[in-house]
Image: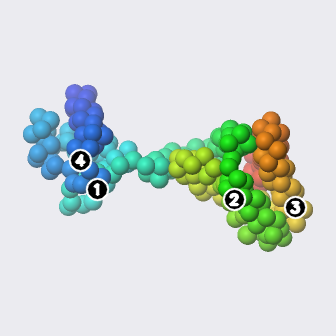
């Protein structure tokens, strides 16, 4: 049954109120919300309006709901954000230009990350990147392992920030684009070319040359896109 505009506005008021209570710490992470009857009294609202508000909060990842149990508070972290965006990303990927749009997002993010790594990576960060590069080199010729070490090399660029949002984003991008990459033919030549591209990125970071590092990254990702786009029925322009 469709809800009236007045009901939707009332539900939005409850959503705002509960969000404020969670943000202020009134309700701790994992704690149960007040009962529906208590929320009805607190916000002077009908059960229908309260339930609509709870549905909205659940869709935003702010509460966890189970049948016959009171909803519980769920503080939003990077993993929760990834989960709530999954359906939107899958819808985007179903469009003809979807994979390219998601991949362009990856390119823009990693251009910034590689410049940041060049300017601020610590000795420990460089050691991690060097180890990921060596693992990638050792995996040449083994398709599955090479793909994992390829992903891990790029993952270090996200991890260097120390920001869990970026590491979660890397995991999401990897998952979302995996079906496209699985279709891309592999060969010893492709592995060697990808490794050399990673080496060029690493050397530019080691030289503390952000322009060179960014150029090497963009060239690497552009080449990867041209290869993978051949697997699509409709190939968009790079």
**Along the viewing direction, whichever of 186 and 112 lies nearer the viewer:** 112
Q: What is the residue that sits farthest to the front in this orientation? A: 123
Q: What is the residue that sits farthest to the right in this orientation? A: 189
The spot of residue 81 in percent (x, y) is: 46, 47
Residue where numbered disc 4 is placed:
27
* Residue 62 shows in the view: yes
For image coordinates 67% across by 56% down, the residue present is 124
When asked about the image quadrant of residue 103, the answer is top right
Disc 3 to disc 1: CB gap under 8 Å: no
For image coordinates 12% across by 38% down, the residue present is 42
Chain-order first, disc 3 or disc 1:
1
Q: Is residue 82 left or right of residue 135?
A: left
* Residue 3 shows in the view: no
Residue where numbered disc 1 is placed:
30
The 10 Å Cα crowd at callout 3, few under 14, some 14 to 19, many 20 or more, is some
The spot of residue 228 in percent (x, y) is: 77, 52
């Amino acid at each position: 049954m469709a809800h009236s505009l007045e009901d939707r506005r009332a539900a939005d008021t409850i959503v705002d109120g509960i969000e404020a209570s969670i943000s202020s710490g009134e309700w701790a992470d994992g704690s149960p919300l007040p009962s529906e009857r208590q929320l009805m009294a607190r916000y002077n609202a009908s059960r229908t309006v309260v339930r609509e508000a709870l549905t909205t909060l659940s869709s935003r990842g702010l509460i966890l709901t189970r049948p016959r149990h009171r909803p519980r508070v769920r503080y939003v972290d990077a993993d929760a954000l990834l989960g709530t965006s999954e359906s939107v990303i899958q819808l985007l990927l179903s469009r003809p230009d979807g994979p390219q749009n998601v991949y362009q997002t990856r390119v823009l993010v990693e251009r910034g990350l590689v410049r940041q790594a060049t300017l601020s990576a610590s000795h420990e960060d460089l050691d991690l990147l060097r180890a990921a590069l060596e693992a990638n080199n050792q995996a040449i010729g083994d398709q599955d392992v090479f793909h994992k070490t390829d992903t891990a090399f790029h993952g270090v660029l996200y991890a260097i920030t120390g920001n869990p949002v970026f590491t979660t984003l890397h995991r999401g991008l990897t998952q979302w684009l995996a079906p496209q990459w699985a279709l891309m033919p592999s060969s010893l030549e492709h592995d060697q070319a990808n490794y050399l591209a990673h080496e060029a990125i690493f050397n530019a970071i080691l030289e503390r040359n952000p322009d060179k590092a960014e150029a090497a990254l963009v060239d690497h990702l552009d080449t990867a896109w041209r290869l993978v786009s051949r697997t699509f029925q409709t190939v968009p322009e790079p």
